[in-house]
Image (tube, rainbow, N blue to C red):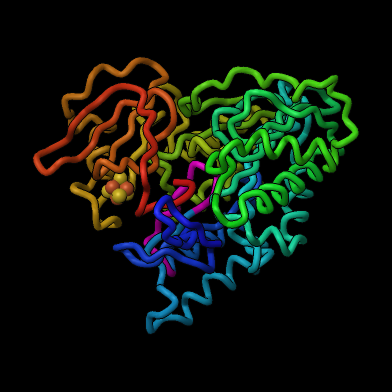
């Protein structure tokens, strides 16, 4: 879709996908949508193979739990056959179920839904149903590649993400539907969640009429959408006693990622692994696929391996540590992020990933302030600060003469050019 900006200029939605790639300084950049962040070992192996054989050999985890490959052949290059080969290869393992809807399948889900005690609703079947519903609707191809759905199982781990339509479970039978940044939610039963989310997306398209990419871009968007749903949508008959719905709990900052072992209800455990700077090498991706049948990537750029036997965890952690993944808590890698930087981004003033790595490994020490526990650190190659997490962050920003370090809450909106949507 296109959108008219403040001055009435029409700007196309350039959010990349697996087919509509973005041309970066280091080649074509493709983003593969991973609803719920769930990948089978077979799928992850194929992505690793594509990355190594067709791209730069690096798989980036995005803040929407999608995967991004860089350095791919562009469609108009002499190697266009290879560009087509990439799409065909990921389609063959089920990662491109719809060519028309590939960029709108933006669905986050609590990574441990249905497995841990705190999980009130197993949202995994809802992810599948929502994805199918999206792909079955011709009109919803009109959503932008930035429009985001989130299914929170009641743990509250997705509340700070700021999705356009969020379901928050509050009991085993239902929860609240939150629209944009609204503080109140509409009560919904579990059976109503997917129809309500699809109805909200349709209503958004109708109300925005091509003038907005996200609910927050629409004046009074949350209130207008709620009104549509309550007067003619799947929850129209809900008796709210005149109130707009129940209050959503306070929104916490995005949690600092850390490695951990989480007990599951069934006696097994899940291992959460920190991926340094959110970038997996092909070898690291293969190592993850070798030790688990399923891997869940998260919006905080970690990888979760569920359903492990407790007696296997130490061995699995050792194997992953050997390839450079972080399985112990409290390291400098937890909460450390960086934008693409040089050479991938032409705007960058430094190799921020290399510098951030050297800093984390203790071989470079810019004059950063002391970082309190749980505070995130973000390195950026220019003032745009792409990929900066929300909340309290220490910023390390490249300038022509070195890095500038700042500590605080940045609230102003930053225009992003190099990385779009969910970096
Ligand atoms: S902040 Fe964004 S535009 Fe600036 S160097 Fe990094 S990726 Fe490029």
Count of numbered marks: 0
Most foreground residue, 335 or 197: 197
Q: Residue at x 35, y 53 (%)?
A: 417
Quadrant for residue 184, please give it: top right
Q: In front here: 122 or 262?
A: 122
Looking at the image, residue 50 sits to the left or right of residue 24; the answer is right
Q: Quadrant of residue 333?
A: top left
Residue drawn 36% across and 37% down? 337
Which of these two is toward me, 338 or 135? 135
Whether residue 179 is visible to the viewer of this picture, yes or no, is: yes
Residue 61 is covered by the magenta coloring: yes
In the image: residue 357, left or right of residue 43: left
Where's residue 261, x and y in %?
58, 25
The percent position of residue 124, horizontal first and vertical second, equals 75, 41
In the figure, 33 relative to 352: above or below?
below
Farthest-out residue, left: 401
Q: Residue at x 41, y 29 (%)?
A: 334
Query: Is residue 270 rendered magenta in the image?
Result: no
Q: Nearer the viewer, residue 139 or 256?
A: 139
Q: Position of residue 65 (x, y in %)?
A: 55, 44
Q: Which residue reaches farthest bottom?
A: 78
Image position of 235 (left or right of 85)? right
Kindly tell me whether residue 283 is visible in this rendering. Answer: no
Q: Residue at x 88, y 30 (%)?
A: 238
Quick one: quadrant of the N terminus?
bottom right
Q: Is residue 356 above or below residue 257?
A: below
Residue 278 lies left or right of residue 39; in this view the side is: left
Placement of 97 over or under 313, stated as above or below: below
Q: Please determine whether, in this image, residue 233 is positioned above or below residue 390.
A: below
Residue 312: percent from the left, percent from the top?
61, 33
Q: Which residues are magenta?
A: 54-67
């Amino acid at each position: 879709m296109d959108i008219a900006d403040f001055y009435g200029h029409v700007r196309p939605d350039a959010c990349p996908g697996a087919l509509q790639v973005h041309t970066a300084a280091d080649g074509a950049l493709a983003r593969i949508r991973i609803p719920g962040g769930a990948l089978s070992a077979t799928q992850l192996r194929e992505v690793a193979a594509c990355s190594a054989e067709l791209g730069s050999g690096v798989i980036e985890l995005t803040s929407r739990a999608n995967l991004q490959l860089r350095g791919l052949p562009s469609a108009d290059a002499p190697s266009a056959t290879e560009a087509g080969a990439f799409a065909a290869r990921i389609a063959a393992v089920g990662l491109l179920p719809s060519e028309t809807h590939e960029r709108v399948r933006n669905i986050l889900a609590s990574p441990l839904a249905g497995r841990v005690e705190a999980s009130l609703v197993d949202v995994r079947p809802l992810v599948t149903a929502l994805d199918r519903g999206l792909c079955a609707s011709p009109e919803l191809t009109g959503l932008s590649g930035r429009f985001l759905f989130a299914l929170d199982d009641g743990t509250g781990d997705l509340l700070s993400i700021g999705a356009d339509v969020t379901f928050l479970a509050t009991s085993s039978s239902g929860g609240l539907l939150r629209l944009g940044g609204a503080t109140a939610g509409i009560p919904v039963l579990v059976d109503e969640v997917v129809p309500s989310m699809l109805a909200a997306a349709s209503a958004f398209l109708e109300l925005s009429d091509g003038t907005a990419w996200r609910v927050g871009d629409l004046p009074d968007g949350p209130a207008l959408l709620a009104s549509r749903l309550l007067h003619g949508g799947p929850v129209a008959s809900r008796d709210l006693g005149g109130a707009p719905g129940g209050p959503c709990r306070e929104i916490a900052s995005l949690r600092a990622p850390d490695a951990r072992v989480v007990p599951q209800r069934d006696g097994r455990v899940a291992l959460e692994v920190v991926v340094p700077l959110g970038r997996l090498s092909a070898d690291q991706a293969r190592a993850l696929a070798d030790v688990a049948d399923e891997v869940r990537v998260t919006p905080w750029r970690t990888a979760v391996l569920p359903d492990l036997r407790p007696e296997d965890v130490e061995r699995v952690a050792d194997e992953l540590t050997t390839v450079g993944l972080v399985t112990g808590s409290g390291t400098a890698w937890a909460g450390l992020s960086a934008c693409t930087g040089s050479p991938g981004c032409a705007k960058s003033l430094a190799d921020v990933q290399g510098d951030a790595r050297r800093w984390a490994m203790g071989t470079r020490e810019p004059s950063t302030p002391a970082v309190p526990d749980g505070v995130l650190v973000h390195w950026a190659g220019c003032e745009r600060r792409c990929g900066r997490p929300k909340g309290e962050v220490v910023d390390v920003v490249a300038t022509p003469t070195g890095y500038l370090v700042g500590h605080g809450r940045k609230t102003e909106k930053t225009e992003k050019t190099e990385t779009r949507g969910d970096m």
